């Protein structure tokens, strides 16, 4: 029995995982640099020998991490990337196989309420500036009627950073992209919901800036109630 426990389960990578790994390795090695443009979906599809859907999903996940950006008329561009995130966090997120959506959302709620509460106590002037910039980017997209899942992700990530708990930030990077991808696929972020999110984001940020930790955690919990209810329905709970 002891010998059996020494063996590890064989991990089988999906096509999306393999694409992410190759792009990550090219950035880490310096072959791809900030500002470089990726080949088109068609060319990547032909090179990898897989359908464009896999290419699109890999690019979307890397966009959530801020590693890639899709620009109209220009294509997919490489951003400057944190090497620690590149080497560790992407590998970790790929290990989540077919996660239970409700469990992901429930975990997110615990982490985000904690983040908001601690951000209100620990935030610095630089943290406030970063959160304000992220909120402005989110509001700008929403008011133009454009998809704002990525900007929403960045705003919540900046709150996690302001909590100055590195473990929470790491877990957020693992959990949020999968949640937001399901939201995008299910068309959950409709215009009315996004307008509501603007007000809720503003209330959370105001409480954090004023260092009202209990109020910040309360607003965050209320903000996440809709996604928690959606997850329950999706998992028939």
Image (cartoon, helix red, strand yellow):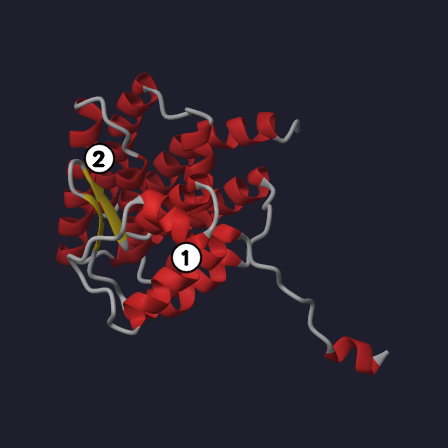
Task: Name above or below for residue 108 compared with residue 199.
Answer: below
Question: Closest to the observer: 54 or 138?
Answer: 54
Q: Residue at x 20, y 38 (%)?
A: 135
In which quarter of the view is residue 195 placed? top left
Question: Closest to the observer: 83 or 221?
Answer: 83
Task: Name above or below for residue 58 compared with residue 34.
Answer: above
Q: Secondary structure at mark 2?
A: helix
In-image side of 223 versus 235 (left or right): left
Q: Is residue 46 visible?
A: yes
Of label 1 and label 2, which has the lower sequence position?
1
Question: Closest to the observer: 192 or 56?
Answer: 56
Task: Name the spot of residue 159 as percent of width and height, x first.
Answer: 29, 49
Mark 1–mark 2 Cα distance, whole angstroms, equals 26 Å
Count the marks. Answer: 2
In-image side of 3 versus 36 (left or right): right
In which quarter of the view is residue 71 placed? top left
Res 46 label: none
Q: Residue at x 46, y 31 (%)?
A: 227
Q: Point out the image quarter for the N terminus.
A: bottom right
Task: Name the spot of residue 226 as percent of width and height, x first.
Answer: 45, 27
Residue corresponding to mark 1: 20
Task: Name the spot of residue 172 as percent of width and height, x first.
Answer: 41, 52
In which quarter of the view is residue 212 placed? top left
Q: Is residue 210 visible?
A: no
Q: Residue furthest bottom?
A: 3
Residue corresponding to mark 2: 138
In-image side of 84 versus 225 (left or right): left
- Closest to the camera, between mark 1 and mark 2, is 1
Packing grade of label 2 (10 A; few <14, some 14-19, many >=20) is many
Task: Name the spot of residue 149 as percent of width and height, x first.
Answer: 32, 36
Packing grade of label 1 (10 A; few <14, some 14-19, many >=20) is many
Task: Name above or below for residue 220 compared with residue 10.
Answer: above
């Amino acid at each position: 029995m002891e010998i059996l426990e020494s063996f590890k389960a064989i991990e089988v990578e999906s096509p999306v995982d393999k694409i992410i790994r190759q792009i990550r390795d090219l950035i880490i090695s310096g072959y791809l640099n900030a500002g470089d443009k990726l080949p088109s979906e068609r060319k990547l599809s032909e090179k990898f020998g897989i359908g464009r859907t896999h290419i699109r999903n890999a690019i979307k996940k890397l966009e959530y991490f801020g590693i890639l950006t899709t620009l109209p008329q220009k294509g997919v561009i490489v951003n400057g990337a944190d090497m620690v995130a590149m080497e560790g966090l992407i590998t970790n997120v790929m290990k989540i196989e077919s996660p239970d959506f409700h469990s992901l959302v429930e975990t997110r709620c615990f982490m985000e309420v904690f983040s908001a509460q601690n951000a209100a106590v620990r935030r610095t002037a630089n943290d406030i500036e970063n959160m304000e910039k992220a909120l402005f980017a989110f509001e700008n997209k929403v008011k133009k009627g454009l998809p704002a899942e990525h900007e929403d992700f960045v705003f919540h990530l900046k709150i996690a950073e302001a909590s100055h708990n590195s473990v929470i930030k790491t877990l957020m990077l693992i959990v949020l992209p999968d949640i937001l991808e399901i939201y995008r696929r299910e068309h959950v972020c409709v215009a009315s919901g996004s307008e509501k999110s603007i007000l809720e984001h503003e209330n959370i940020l105001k409480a954090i800036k004023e260092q009202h930790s209990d109020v910040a955690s309360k607003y965050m919990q209320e903000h996440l109630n809709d996604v928690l209810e959606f997850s329950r329905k999706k998992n028939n709970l």
